[in-house]
Each structure stands twice: as C-alpha cells, then as structure tokens.
Image (cartoon, rainbow, N blue to C red):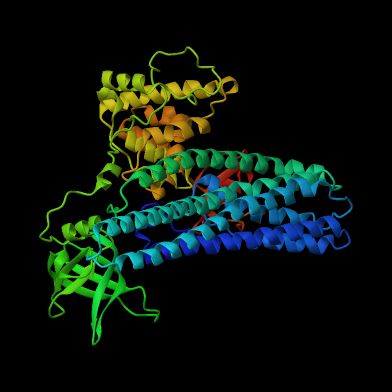
Amino acid sequence: MGLPTLEFSDSFLDSPDFRERLKCHEIELERTNKFIKDLIKDGNMLITALKNLSAAVQKFSQSLQEFQFECIGDAETDDEVNIAQSFKEFSQLLNTVEEERRRLIQNADDVLITPLEKFRKEQIGAAKEGKKKFDKETEKYYSTLERHLSLSSKKKEAYLQEADMQIDKERQLFYDASLEYVFKIQEVQEKKKFEFVEPLLAFLQGLFTFYHEGYELAHEFEPYKQQLQFNLQNTRNNFVSTKQEVEKLMKRIRSADQDYKPPGQWTMEGFLYVQEKRPLGCTWTRHYCTYEKSSKTFTMSNTENKSAGKQPEVFKLKSCIRRKTDSIDKRFCFDVEVAERHGVMTLQALSESNRRLWLEAMDGREPVRNSACSSLKYSFGAVLGPCSNSSFCFFHCHTGINTMGLYRIGGVNSKVQKLMTTWPAFLLFPHFYLFSFSESDDQNYRVRAVHALVHKMPERNKEMLELLIKHLVRVSAQNQSNLMTVSNLGVIFGPTLMRSQEETVAAMMNIKFQNIVVEILIENFNKVSHSLTLNGLVSYFCCLYRDAKAMYSCEAEHSHELSFPQGAHFSNVYPSVEPGWLQATYEGKTGLIPENYVVFL
C-alpha cells in the first residue's frame, strides 16, 4: 500500500482523517530529506577518502539497498516498478566494483551532490516552508473562528457584517495555504521518482570511465541504462500531463463555494459546536460530526478532548429543526433529537450555508437548494470530449504526418466542437475500466484483455477506434522525423480517450495507466483489431503458453531471473522481449530463464 492520496476537497473539511493522511506525507518527506543528506554525505566520503573507498562504497551500497520508494496510489506502472527497483540494481553494481579503487573519482560533485542538494533545498525546502505557512494560517484561522462564533447575535448588524467579512478573509487565507501545501507536498513525492535516480545514474556512468574494468561493466549496464532512461522519460511525461490536470482540478476546487458538500461515504460531515450544559451555564465544544441518511446514524467525535482511545458517540436521529436566532444567543444553530438522549441537542454550524447543508441532509424543516458543488461533477461517458485539443481528421490524412511534435500543438476548440457535432455517433463509445489489466506484468495478458474489450464494443464505435489507432500506427512509424513515439502518443491520447468516473487527485494519478492502454492498442494493432473466430482466438493465445523442462541447472544473477535445478518443470513459457530468454513460471514465481537451458514438452 502506497502513500494515501490527498484530495483538495478535504482541505475545506480539514478533518482528522485528512490530518492523519497529511501526516503520512510529512513523515515520508522527512524520511526522504534525511536519506538525501545521508546520500550526499556518503558521496563526499567517496570523493575525499580514497583510502577508505571500499568502506564508503559498501555503506553507500547498503543505503541504496535499504531505501524503498513509496509512490502515490495503490498500483504502480512498469516504469515506476523499474524505477523503484533501480536503487537495488545500483547497489548490486556497486558491490561488483568495490575492489576497483585505482582510479580517482572526478566530477562526482557536479553530477551527484549538486542535483541532490538542489532537490533537497528547492523542492523539500519549499514543501517545509509551505507547512510553516499552513500551520500558521491554521492556528490563526481557528482562533479567529472561535472568537467569531462567540459573538452575540444581539450585536449591531454593521458590526456582525464586519466580523463576517473578517472571518471570510481568514478562511480564504487558510484554504489557500492548505491547497498550496497539499499540491506542493504531493508534487515533491512525485518528482523524487526521477530526480533521485537521474543524478545517481549519471554518477555511476562517470565511475565506469575511471575503473580498469569500466568499459566491460558499462557495456553490460547499457541495456538496463537505456530501459531506465526510457522509464524515467515516461514517468516525467506522465508527471507533466498529470500535473496539468491536477492544477486544473485545484483551480476548480478553489473557485467553488467554501461550504459545498464534497463526495464521500457520509451524507454530511464536518465540524459542529455542541452545547453542553453546566451548573453555572453552558459551554460549546467542537466535535467532528458525520451523518448517514439511509440509516439516520449521527456520530460525534470530540476533537478538543486530549484523552486517547475515546470512541465517538453514535446516535439514531429522530428529528432536526432550525433554531431561531431570537431564541438563542448564538448564530447558525439547529436542534436535533436522538433516540439515545432525552431532550434535544443544540448544535452550531460554521456558517449559514453550512447550516443549510446539515438541515438538508437531516431532512430538517428549512428547505434548501442543492449545493454549488454540482458544478464540480462531470460526465465521463464520452471518450472524446471538449477536453481534446488535437485534431482528429485522420481518416484519409497523410499531410503533415512528418511534422515534428505532431499532436503536441493545441487545436482550435471551435473546430473540434464542430467536428464532434458532425460525427457524434462515431466519436463516443462506452467507458472501459482498463486499469486492472494495465497494471499486470504479463504483456500477453494485457493484449488479450484489450482484445476482448475491443470486441465487446458496438460495431460503429469499433470502426471509429480502428480508424484512430490505424492512423496513430502510421504516425508512430514516422517517429524518426515527427518524434512522436508510441510512448509520446500514449501521453497525449491516453487522458483524451479514457475518463475517470470522478475528478479527484486519485483519479488523476491513474492517467499513467490510460497511457499504457493506448500504447498497447498502437503496438498490438493487428492482434487487437483482427476479427478472429472464437476457436481461432483460443488457439492463437493458447499457443503462446507452453510447458518446458530444464536440461541444466541455473543460478539467477538478477532479481528478475529464476534459479532452478536440472529437471525443473516450467509452465506458461513464452518468448521474452530480451533475445535468448524466455518468460516462465516455476514454483509460483515468474521470471526469465535462458532459452538454451530448456526443451519444450
């Protein structure tokens, strides 16, 4: 399980759960900051202490082996998996060159120390400054809020209006600081995936040129380096596209009403002040409250009580009614009657609009309008919607196919709208839930899954998809001139062709899987598009998997390879993308085996 996603909408609620998730990110950020400091220290030891180089390399290698990337979300792409494993690969590589200490390590400061220090100071430092601002505005806002809520309703109207304006100003400053801090801390967590690895990759490349056996070692490392650079570039491209979408979401959330009801598991939730009667008067205590309309369950958690382990109070709601202003010396109040207590409980909302939302959720007597949050809901059934900035007149188009950066230049929205009006039946097809199989490590399984879903589409929609992918295949074939590789086309068309059911930060993080699906469609166009009979389809995919037997024993040298004895039996054997190797399953583990070590059964 990775780090929890921080939603911008939670900044308005500022719930305890939001604070806990934010704390997880802060702990991870501090852990990363400490790791960078240790890494820089180890690198300097490597430069200055040649006599102790062996010990320094061993310590440095151990640090890399122990560190584990934590990515946002529940699943990782192939690129992120490879990036997460890269430190362990580097560690193994350093262990093989520990005894090769005859060359001086030069230029290590420029390629390793400076970028890491820059990332720590500029990125993590900026996140820490954002935390200071957020903590300051939090304390200032809640102290102002408590003073504001304690104002008597008998005050002059002008005085109350001025107080309302002041609390609105403080609330806006608090929300702005919260949104900016949430955005920055998640941005740093994402950027570390490539800004960590790139300096280390350059540092290792420098080592090869100074060691006696560096040439041969660098030659062996070259394929992995190219794959890692490809993974890094894909991750960077995904980051850029995801960042743009998240920024748009943050702006829409910022422009929405402050008291809207965000999507969640509860009908209504938020802070309420509860009146508690005392012998010498009454007090108002802040509680975090939730309400489930279907079961009429109302819960209250005292956030001001410091005692640990206290369970929230759970009630069965019987009725709810708005409290008139002239009946109590407080504003924004309403009464609720519950089955577990005699009499009524008086609650104070944070504002008039907040009280309306609570009354609406609890079926109170005061009629209300729907929250402005409906403006945040979108229909995601359309695959090609107004968000598309590229021109899709590709049916018989060959002109400009060699243009550099094709489809990276934004189109004219009015022309796109006109095109969609002209061919509405072709431009829409049902939304697919493709992420489950795009997260699988088995490439053949991915292709089969895409193939099955494509053949479930309506015929007209399938024809439209085939026209689009066929055109993208032609575009990718000219990537030497237009620079539009399959990966680049996936970054552009992934977010356009597939939409999430809800617009949240968690959904934005899944854009990388949308890109993978488009890459599968382009790279395997012939397999996916051909209309195979059922028997032909079964025989086609079944022939990919065979059983095999080991003629010799083998000891794995890398984590993605399998160790096996002579006579071992393998299942699900099929050719790997690496020449001379097969992908196979042995004793529940899947990995690479040498092709010349086995015979097929």
With 215 as the anchor, is 402 left or right in this view?
left
Q: Residue sitting at 81 percent across and 57 percent down?
A: 46
The percent coordinates of residue 508 (x first, y second) are 42, 45
The percent coordinates of residue 535 (x first, y second) are 32, 35
Q: For residue 227, which quarter of the picture?
A: top right
User: In this orientation, which residue lies closer to the viewer: 451 or 167?
Assistant: 167
The percent coordinates of residue 224 (x first, y second) are 66, 43
Q: Residue sitting at 48 percent across and 64 percent down?
A: 23
With 600 as the anchor, is 431 left or right in this view?
left
Residue 376, above or below 354: above
Residue 503, above or below 141: above
Residue 452, above or below 285: above
Q: For residue 360, which quarter of the picture?
A: bottom left
Task: Tell me if residue 554 can be seen.
Answer: no
User: In this orientation, which residue lies closer to the viewer: 122 or 218?
Assistant: 122
The percent coordinates of residue 474 (x first, y second) are 48, 20
Task: Tell me if residue 359 can be seen.
Answer: yes
- Count of numbered tags: 0
Residue 82, above or below 155: above
Q: Residue sitting at 63 percent across and 40 percent down?
A: 229
Q: Residue sitting at 27 percent across and 42 percent down?
A: 375
Q: For residue 413, which quarter of the picture?
A: top left
